[in-house]
Amino acid sequence: MLAWVKTAKGYATGTSTEHEKEQQAVPQAPKLYLSICPPSPEESEELARGLTLAGAPLQSPRFVNMGWKEGQKFTAQDDPDRMKQPWAPPAFVSMLKDPEAQRNRTRVEELPVPEAEQRLGSFARIVHGVLDECECRDLLASINEKGFTPALLNTGGGRQQLLPFVRNGHRAIVDCPALSQHLLEVLRPHLPEKFCGGQLVDLNERCRILCYTPGQ
């Protein structure tokens, strides 16, 4: 069966099978998402397909439908981040693992900082290997139990607002002093004990885990 195909120089003929192969060869643009329209469970599984962590398939993120509307505002009493919801941290947090052992597996990547900021003592660095793959897997699994909701914009005074065209992504927030203390001990050699007259005491126990999908 012949098919007429329009080209820049006019029309050309070819078999329908050839035309279908040409269409299949064109890469499809990925679907883009807004935080108020997250992937469905099936789409979430497809996004994670083929990815592995700690030798196992990567668990697909679970998005919680809150029914929020663009521009919606929240107060602390609304508890939009569901801080009152019980959450069980991953097992490694309570296993009293030696942070020094993990500390020896880290490596630092220094990032450029404007010279004026350097003179003030500012720095920017990425510390790789703070958690091993098994710990990452377990942390993601425990966070997935709570699920991800649209990331809100802090507007001051304990108020937040859903503005997906300003901040587009998902997050889960949990309070976990034990996790933040473990992270501090792993990170301690890479952090200054004193900075701008202040003393290093601890890390913020309010842990924010972010999740981005195509388009975010």
Image (spheres, grey):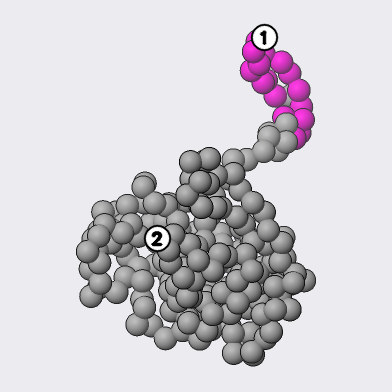
Estimate the x, y position of residue 25 in percent, counting from the top left.
73, 36
Q: Is residue 18 magenta?
A: yes
Quadrant of the image containing the N terminus = top right
Q: Is residue 6 magenta?
A: yes
Amino acid residing under circle 2: Ala
Residue interval drawn in magenta: 3-21
Local SS, label 2: loop
The answer, for residue 137, to whether it is visible in the render is no
Labelled disc at residue 206: none
Closer to the camera in the image, 191 or 42: 191
On screen, residue 119 versus residue 162, left or right, reads: right
> Which picture quadrant has residue 80?
bottom left
Closer to the camera in the image, 8 or 75: 75
Estimate the x, y position of residue 6 in percent, counting from the top left.
64, 17
Of labels 1 and 2, earlier in sequence is 1
On screen, residue 113 versus residue 171, left or right, reads: right
Residue ID at (23%, 75%): 77
Estimate the x, y position of residue 146 in percent, counting from the top left.
47, 77
Residue ID at (55%, 64%): 192
- Residue holding disc 1: 9
Mark 1: give few (<14), some (14-19) or many (20+) Cα within 10 Å.
few
Mark 2: give few (<14), some (14-19) or many (20+) Cα within 10 Å.
many
- Residue holding disc 2: 151
